[in-house]
Image (cartoon, rainbow, N blue to C red):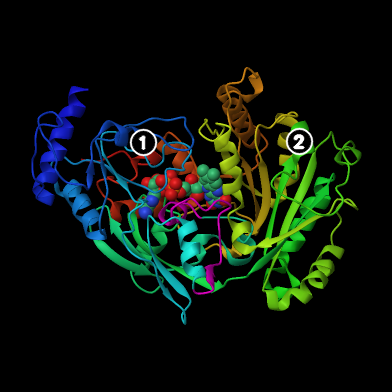
Amino acid sequence: MMAAKLLLVLVICRLIVTFGLTLNSSEVFGIGINDHRFGLNPTELESASHDFGGQNRAEPLAVFHPTSADDISRLIKSAYESAHGFTVSARGHGHSINGQAHTKNGVVIQMSDSKKLVEPRVDESLRFVDVWGGELWIDVLNYTLRYGLAPKSWTDYLYLSVGGTLSNAGISGQAFNHGPQISNVYELDVITGKGELRTCSEQQDSELFHAVLGGLGQFGIISRARIALESAPQRVRWIRVLYSNFSSFTHDQEYLISLHSQPAAQKFDYVEGFVIVDEGLINNWRSSFFSPSNPVKISSVVGANGGVLYCLEITKNYHQLNAHAIDQEVEELLKKLNYIPATEFTTDLPYVDFLDRVHKAELKLRSKGLWEVPHPWLNLFVPKSRIDDFDKGVFRGILGNKTSGPILIYPMNKNKWDERSSVVTPNEEVFYLVALLRSALDNGEETQTLEYLSDQNRQILRFCDDAGIKIKQYLPHYNTQKQWMDHFGDKWPMIYQRKMEFDPKHILATGQRIFQPNF
Ligand code: FAD
């Protein structure tokens, strides 16, 4: 505790020199800072100590609210050049699961703030938007729609920051077609671990550009991103169909993503899916999804497969002008699929409502006090060649008949991912995302506790290891450098080299636990 206090005093002294701050009455250990950019009050420190996962707590020394990229540059320079350095972590919207945006005894830079730092700028003819790294995707969407344009690749949930998702990959049902969000960026402004503010792209400073994309915040802080846009659709036809046979389900998903190079009319725009192992979910699987067609009795299709059902979820975007063609296009595509007859549910809604669908669920959960609970989420990339084994061992094995949250499963095409980025994916042309998005509850049911669900996650990872299923964690979480080396595999030497070049003192994003600070 004394050491932390001493460090805080040293850090504050350093910041006073760097930013020319004025001292006021003794606020913290005799030193106060009269500058709106620094947050030192307990409420702010507490809020930067938590994240969506709700399982880790790490209190920073201070929270920094930058007013420009130069502010960030000066802060990091001061950490880099000081004999008594300090760590710095960008925090987007704090939606990590395992403390990835935390930094104990360092400074958290709050990138997503209500104050607009930099207005987005749309270039209509070149079809891109420049946005601040802390901008939330929902705001990017609302802004670009004013021009009839929208980003091409999404996450399922839009209250995430641009810098936060680009530091991972950013995936959803469009990834098979457009690639992850990191494949849809033209240019970045990045502040490195030495405090240099650099503009990078495929053509300029390309090593830094590729390092930062999927780089888990290790190589620099994204202050601006130039994001590719397309003409925004107006409406979405949203369809769900059910399977009891896993092979038919994955066969159809893989067929649909193989159409990525076909003309727009001959493919869906979004391909996802989810697993229903839960008795509760069987009765509720259409919640937040209204279909005017007559619902089938789900109990009549459950049975043969130990009660497990698989739901394919697909959408087709369209403009009002082409509304006449949509029925025919959807029908042609559905004809090729082998789902259980009469399990087709369709709805039609504005494009924004579709993209923002998870927020509706969030509001419902918040109203019941079920949003701010621990989330022991596990996200895995599973190679296509082993997805059947994963089904048998996990969906129809380890999980039992209670899941405590949605389980997403959808395939992606590896050729839409740029190998030069820092992200790692399985070594096969097609791999699946399996996302176990579970909430822990303290309601007396043993199978819903944090301990139970965390233990199940460990069992799943052990099962994959024992069965030789070469998964890669998405939004990875490891505690030792050895585990990280295994995670990065062949990419580790490149990751290490990039770290030495762009953040040699290991100042940035220590919450990822890849590198120990080096000062
Ligand atoms: P934070 O949690 O604040 O930060 C994450 C990491 O990025 C930290 O290491 C941090 O230091 C670093 N970082 C943050 N900002 C910057 C920056 N500007 N520059 C450099 N590094 C930075 N992911 C998907 O891909 N698809 C989904 O559909 C999806 N859905 C989700 C739904 C919910 C409800 C939640 C909670 C998460 C979801 N995620 C999804 C995961 C999400 O993309 C990641 O957790 C992401 O990191 C969250 O963004 P954030 O802004 O909250 O980042």
Closest to the observer: 461 or 22? Answer: 22
Percent position (x, y) of residue 294?
Answer: 87, 51
- The amino acid type of the residue labelled 1 equals Ser
Q: Quadrant of the C terminus?
A: top left
Percent position (x, y) of residue 486?
Answer: 49, 42
- From this view, report whether residue 440 is shown above or below residue 255: above
Residue 277 is tagged as 2
Q: Residue furthest top?
A: 444
- From this view, report whether residue 104 is shown above or below residue 132: above
- From this view, report whether residue 237 is shown above or below residue 17: below
Secondary structure under tag 2 reads: loop
Residue 209 is left or right of residue 310, and the answer is left
Residue 199 is left or right of residue 263, and the answer is left
Residue 47 is tagged as 1
On the image, which quarter does residue 47 sit in?
Answer: top left
On the image, which quarter does residue 282 sit in?
Answer: top right
Closest to the observer: 171 or 462? Answer: 171
Q: Residue at x 15, y 31 (%)?
A: 28
- The amino acid type of the residue labelled 2 equals Val
Magenta stretch?
A: 147-169
- The answer to whether the residue labelled 2 contacts the one labelled 1, judged by CB atoms less than 8 Å apart, is no
Percent position (x, y) of residue 149?
Answer: 53, 72
Does the image show residue 298?
yes
The image shows a total of numbered marks equal to 2
Dot 1 beta carbon under 8 Å from ligand 1: no
Does the image show residue 497?
no
Q: Residues within 10 Å of mark 1 (few under 14, many from 20)?
A: few
